[in-house]
Image: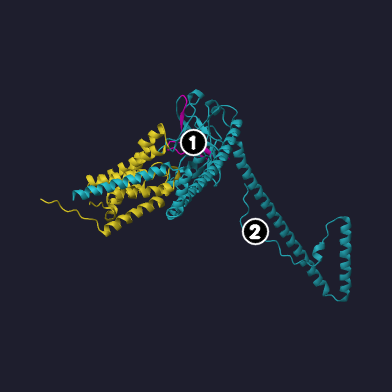
Amino acid sequence: MARSVRSDGRIDTSLALVCVLLAVFALILPRRTREGFAASLRTTVLSPLVALEGRASSVRAAIVARNDVLVTRGQVATQALQVKAVADENTTLRRLLGLSARLQDGFVPAELLPSRGAGDEFTIALATGSDAGVQPFLPVVTADGLVGMVQSVDRATSFAITWAHPDFRVSAMSVDEGAFGIVQPHLGAGAERWLLEMRGVPFRAKLAPGTLIVSSGLGATYPRGIPVGTVLGELSTPEKWARTYLVKPSVLPAAIGPVLVLLSSRTQRGVNGVWTTVSAADSAARAVAAAGDSLARAAALDELAARRAALDAAADTLADSTLVFFAGGRGTEADSVRADSARTDSTRVRARADSGARPRVRPDTSKPRPTVPPPAVRTGPPPAVR
Amino acid sequence: MSRPQQQTPGIGSALRAWLGFAILLTAHFAVRPLFSGRAHVDFIVIAILFSAVRMRPGLAALTGFLTGLAVDALAPGSFGASALVLTLVAFGASWLKAVFFADHVALTGLFVFAGKWVFDVAMTLLTGGASGASLVVTLLLWSPLSAALTALLAVLLLTVFRPLYRPHTY
């Protein structure tokens, strides 16, 4: 038993030694011989494993290629978005430059600092502070209109509430100064939270949707004429003595980028003419609409005049026919008389025509009337005149 | 007092052993290329170690040698290195298992970890693929990571496919 075990051990050791020697021999073989031997193994015994490995590598390459395609697609989409963002930013900055040129002085440009996350949607941090002259209660604006008001100021930074802040209030008016009220956040649910409402508008002042609302200048914080928003519609409230309107803000939350802080000197001087283009555009739109209404009114008057003329002509024709009827009842002499009469009428007509006087019988009424239908009569209310 | 007579593994056990070996060998060429990275699972080492504990040391050494030759044929730059190292690893594993290793999953994991690390260290030193700091990083970072991954997979295989890979004492 022990001899057998010892013999087996020797065999194992011998076999292992032989394997080791063969492996060392393979290691020290000339390179060409090793490669030839390896190639013969790959093409014969190991060919299935080589094919399997090649297929797995292909699968791996396909996966990597798919990832590359997805990554490339994502990069392209990101770049496209960046291009649009750059274009939007360019537009914003250009408009801000235009606003700066119109303001000329009395303002501080400010970049927005990154938001601090949730719960900070209604406040913006500005990269400018008291060193630049920023003080609390100064208005913050963009080229589109009012953004909010500076609330607190540090040396290099400041914090402003936006129009969506629950504490935000601005005395406002319609751009034609026909209605005044207080604009404040709507405080609705969902997307309506990002709207404004104009409260306390006198009941007699009815605002049409699309009416531009600007700051009224009352209250000394916001100068007169800064666009606040446009009227969307009227809200029904328990207050029967005043109207409340839903207002779409001029500066949308996503569009709040670089802003201008109007300094107190500029606030006191006012911003008349700075947002003139906006007001003028609104006035121009109203003027165009009014002009269109005037044209409609003129057309209606022309129609009435033409209709009146047609009725007059019909009345004249009827009178002539009646005369002819009575004259025809007297016999042949009457025919000559009628002919004379007709001739006389013609002569008279010619004479009147020569003299430039108005003929009694209008030329067009002696001819058969064309079968053109009479002008349609407008059945609706007369066009409003603004 | 007589010693309990050790059972000789039957044909079924041998077939299961070779089937497990073939599956791991196939996985080495079919699954391993799907993953990339410095630390990777070595199915060949698992196959050699699992089969070595069922064989006599001589036969295990021969299996390691032939398997190493197959691996070397696909990497002719170091032809013979894998054959040499796998021969030694298989022989040592079979001898160690015959001496004192028990049928324990955690010990088997440790066994595979040590076998894979020794294999990597020997291959790195033999092929001279790294030197200096790179050598240290390879031997002390990537090789243990690969060994750990390989041991983890070995334990998983031993747990899930226990009838196929259960060690057999002789």
Q: Is residue A222 above or below residue B52?
A: above
Color of chain B here?
yellow
- Residue A170 is labelled as 1
Question: Picture coordinates of residue A220 (x, y %)?
Answer: 50, 30
Q: How is the image coloured?
A: by chain
Question: Picture coordinates of residue B59 (x, y %)?
Answer: 30, 50
Label 2 element class: loop
Estimate how packed mark 1 is, as few (under 14), some (14 to 19) or many (20 or more) residues with alpha carbons within 10 Å. many
Label 1 element class: strand
Question: Picture coordinates of residue A254 (x, y %)?
Answer: 50, 41
Q: Nearer the viewer, residue B69 or A53?
A: B69
Q: Amino acid at mark 2?
A: Arg
Q: Is residue A114 left or right of residue A301?
A: left
Q: Amino acid at mark 1?
A: Val
The residue that disc 2 covers is A378
Please say whether residue A162 is one of the residues in the magenta stretch: yes
Q: Nearer the viewer, residue B36 or A251?
A: B36
Among the chains pictured, the one given cyan colouring is A
On the question of residue B106 being in view, the answer is: no
On the question of residue A210 being in view, the answer is: yes
Question: Which residue occupies 60% across, 39% down?
Answer: A279
Distance (Cα) linking label 2 and label 1: 45 Å
The residue range painted magenta reads A155-180
